[in-house]
Image (cartoon, rainbow, N blue to C red):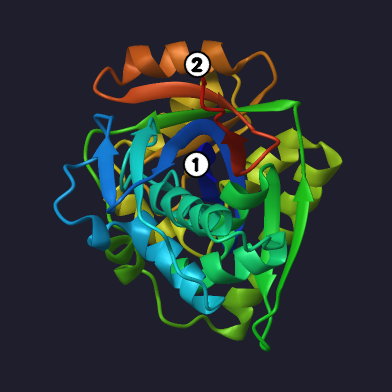
Amino acid sequence: MNKCVITVPASSANVGPGFDSVGIAVSKYLTLTVEEADHWEFEHHSVHLPPVSDPHEHLIYQSALKTAEAYHASLPACKVIVESDIPLARGLGSSASAIVSGIELANQLCCLSLSEQEKLAIATEIEGHPDNVAAALLGGFVITSQLANGEIEWFRKIDQQVEFVVSIPEFELKTDDARQVLPEQFTRNEAAAASSIANIVFVALLSGDYEQAGKLMEQDLFHEPYRAGLIPNYEKIRFEAKSTGAYGTVISGAGPTTISLVGKGNGEKVALHLKSKFPDYTVDCLKMTAVGVQVHPVLSSTT
């Protein structure tokens, strides 16, 4: 490989009660333009990305190196131009997209020919849970479960009948901080009640009953009640989105972004309404992207 372009979609995790299990790939992207070089170099071409101090501390490099080492391969140096419209620490899978891009970078540089299952296993090990990385890797709506033996089972569906309106505030919320407010344990009754809600939400989504899915996703008991206090305008955004036709609104990942489930063709209307009500937010209408990580070779011109 002399030069290639790697693209990875953003993702929204949980979708209400699918805590650490469910992810949706959405139409914002991280893009790497990769060219072999004498030494490692990262150039950031995005307002969402901080300056690069040490390329060896970069999450993309570290993910690529871990992948290469796992398969006893030597990772050649590259110049990587990074472009992104995924805001950092907002609940749209910025770290997952970086991890998946790093794994794919090593896969290409070292000619590893990794399977989706192998990539997912490495990504989950790095990220700690499979929800965002599975969506970024596979695309679509993905439900995952990491079994006691470490194996990861997953189910994937593409649904073009829905759109997603994200309301993104200006401040960041680190996932670790959002996890600190969660209880360490649930009683059997609490777990059963929370799981029963999740069961209906995802059966409803898979069967196309979006009204029921939207109603129940707002009833999550696993994390939303505990994180709601960290999300400004949480209840107001829910109310305003629903008043304009959204089926339901939940926290995207760990937040602080909220994501509204909307019927196809209605997303722009909901987004415009939310923009008018919350002018300090970035509000976007996104689609579910059917494809996860992609690699496009760049042919060098000859004279």
Q: Is residue 256 visible?
A: no
Q: Amino acid at mark 2?
A: Thr
Give the image location of residue 194, x and y in percent. 61, 66
In the image, 198: left or right of 49? right
x, y percent for residue 44: 26, 36
Identified by mark 1, the residue type is: Asn
- Tell me: 77 left or right of 238: left
The correct choice, above or below, for 156 with respect to 129 in the image is above
Of the pair 259 and 24, the residue shown nearer to us: 24
Q: Where is residue 277 drawn, in percent x and y?
A: 34, 17
Residue at x 66%, y 43% (from the top left corner): 139
- Residue at horizontal 70 percent and vertical 66 percent from the top: 117
Q: Closest to the observer: 231 or 287? A: 287
Disc 1 packing (10 Å; few <14; some 14–19; many ≥20)? few
In the image, is residue 206 above or below residue 187?
above
- The alpha-carbon separation of the residues under discs 2 and 1 comes to 17 Å
Secondary structure under badge 2?
Answer: loop
**Which labelled disc corresponds to residue 302?**
none
Q: Nearer the viewer, residue 215 or 55?
A: 55
Q: Residue lying furthest front in this view?
A: 303
Q: How many marks?
A: 2
Badge number at residue 2:
1
Which residue appears at 59% of the width and 35% of the height? 297
Residue at the limit of the structure toward the right, as seen here: 207
- CB within 8 Å, label 2 to label 1: no
Residue 150 occupies quadrant: bottom right
Q: Which residue is mark 2?
A: 303
Observer able to see residue 48 = yes
Query: On screen, 11 above or below 210?
Result: below
